[in-house]
Image: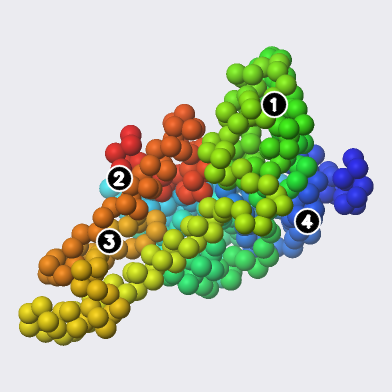
């Protein structure tokens, strides 16, 4: 209550928090709820941003429940969980015979939810062709079923969410710029758990009491050192990860007071991601990933430049090739066409480089090895639960499934 008085939380925000089970009084969280309530009566598209596991799914519910469409349908769609080949059919419907297996015509979500609200979670996972269809719906309210030439109308409000930097995705050609501006008329940012201070204590106690009540077990409590450790831990999986950890302790440490040593056993890689909040030189996986991606994209540009020169100039032995390599800023022995994971960079097609195998040998797979090991460890830490592992790795479930198959981790 002290925090609530300090932050002057309005009755409307308090009611929304109570109705949708939102726990916490951090100013950034309160501001996000206030923005959702303010935009709810105005029929604008909304983009909810924030890391995976922060609770972005609550905000489209607030917007729908507090708006004029609250008595109409609300449909939530996880764009990352639908295969690329069927997502157009799921969203816009299809006609009978439109593709193999289409034995009947089918309504899509945009037709089913007409008059209401559709929530597109992980919107950055949409293929570019589907993005073009979505843009048309946002601009004109029109869409075509798969296999149909008849234009249909829908009256729908779109709320989208993503844990991806969409401006960066636009710059990389993975997301349409015009769609980005259409979706992000209003933006709501949900803060990561590590920035919510004492909310971590409130959430952990709520999860502990809820677990004990649900399963009829003695409730765990937390010592001061354990609460301090939880507050300074990075929580890469955010609220979802905190709930997972507390429920594990609720089962295996039932009725005990959790101290720091006990907590350490349930925090993955605690030595790497446990960081005091006051530390200025703290290790950041987010910054490390940004640096790594920058290096990879820079290398890809140099390889593309090299390939273009090789294609445009006749080959007369090794000497011209060496000259081209020098102009591209690469040593002949270092010119490589690395096979990086597809989630990081689009590698040159095999047929484009097969003629230059002498100049561009296969690269060591050290980056792949690291990615494979990171996925393996995440699956182990989450006892094979792929959804939780994907949240911890900050990737979509669809990407994780593809990686598991690619690396033979089934």
Residue at mark 3: 338
Judge depth for marks 2 and 4 and give the one in front.
2
**Residue 151 showing in the rendered view:** no
Q: Residue at x 64, y 36 (%)?
A: 242
Residue at mark 1: 259
Q: CA distance from mark 3 to mark 1?
A: 47 Å
Q: Residue at x 75, y 27 (%)?
A: 223
Q: CA distance from mark 1 to mark 2?
A: 40 Å
Q: CA distance from mark 3 to mark 2?
A: 16 Å
Indicate how the structure is coloured in the image: rainbow
Judge depth for marks 3 and 1 and give the one in front.
1
Residue at mark 4: 31
Q: Earlier in the sequence, mark 1 or mark 2?
A: 1
Question: What secondary structure is found at the residue carrying circle 1?
Answer: loop
Q: Is residue 276 left or right of residue 271?
A: right
The crowd level at tag 2 (other Cα within 10 Å; few <14, some 14-19, many 20+) is few
Question: What secondary structure is found at the residue carrying circle 2?
Answer: helix
- Whether residues under marks 4 and 1 lie with C-beta atoms below 8 angstroms apart, the answer is no
For the C terminus, the image quarter is top left
Q: CA distance from mark 4 to mark 1?
A: 33 Å
Residue at mark 2: 406
Q: Earlier in the sequence, mark 3 or mark 2?
A: 3
């Amino acid at each position: 209550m002290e925090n609530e008085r300090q932050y002057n939380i309005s009755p409307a925000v308090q009611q929304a928090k109570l109705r949708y089970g939102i726990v916490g009084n951090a100013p950034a969280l309160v501001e996000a709820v206030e923005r959702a309530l303010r935009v709810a009566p105005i029929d604008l598209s909304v983009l909810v941003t924030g890391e995976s596991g922060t609770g972005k799914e609550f905000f489209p519910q607030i917007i729908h429940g507090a708006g004029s469409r609250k008595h109409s349908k609300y449909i939530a769609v996880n764009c990352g969980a639908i295969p690329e080949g069927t997502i157009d059919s799921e969203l816009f419907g299809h006609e009978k015979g439109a593709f193999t297996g289409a034995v009947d015509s089918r309504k899509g979500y945009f037709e089913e939810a007409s008059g209401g609200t559709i929530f597109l979670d992980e919107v950055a996972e949409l293929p570019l062709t589907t993005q073009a269809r979505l843009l048309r719906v946002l601009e004109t309210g029109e869409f075509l079923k798969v296999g149909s030439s008849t234009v249909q109308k829908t009256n729908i409000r779109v709320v989208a969410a993503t844990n991806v930097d969409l401006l960066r995705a636009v710059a990389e050609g993975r997301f349409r710029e015009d769609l980005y501006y259409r979706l992000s008329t209003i933006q709501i940012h949900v803060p990561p758990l590590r920035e919510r201070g004492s909310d971590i204590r409130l959430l952990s106690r709520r999860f502990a009491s809820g677990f004990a009540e649900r399963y009829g077990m003695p409730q765990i409590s937390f010592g001061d050192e354990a609460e301090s450790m939880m507050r300074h831990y990075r929580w890469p999986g955010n609220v979802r990860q905190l709930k997972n950890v507390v429920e594990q302790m609720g089962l295996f440490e039932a009725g005990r007071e959790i101290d720091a040593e006990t907590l350490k056993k349930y925090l993955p890689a605690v030595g790497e991601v446990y960081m005091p909040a006051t530390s200025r030189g703290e290790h950041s996986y987010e910054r490390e990933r940004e640096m790594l991606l920058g290096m990879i994209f820079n290398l890809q540009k140099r390889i593309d430049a090299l390939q273009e020169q090789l294609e445009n100039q006749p080959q007369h032995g090794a000497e011209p090739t060496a000259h081209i390599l020098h102009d591209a800023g690469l040593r002949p022995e270092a010119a490589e066409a690395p096979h990086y994971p597809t989630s990081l960079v689009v590698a040159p097609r095999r047929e484009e480089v097969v003629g230059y195998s002498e100049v561009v040998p296969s690269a060591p797979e050290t980056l792949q090895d690291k990615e494979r090991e990171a996925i393996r460890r995440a699956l182990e830490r989450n006892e094979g639960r792929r959804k939780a592992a994907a949240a911890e790795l900050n990737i979509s479930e669809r990407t994780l499934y593809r990686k598991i198959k690619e690396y033979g981790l089934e």
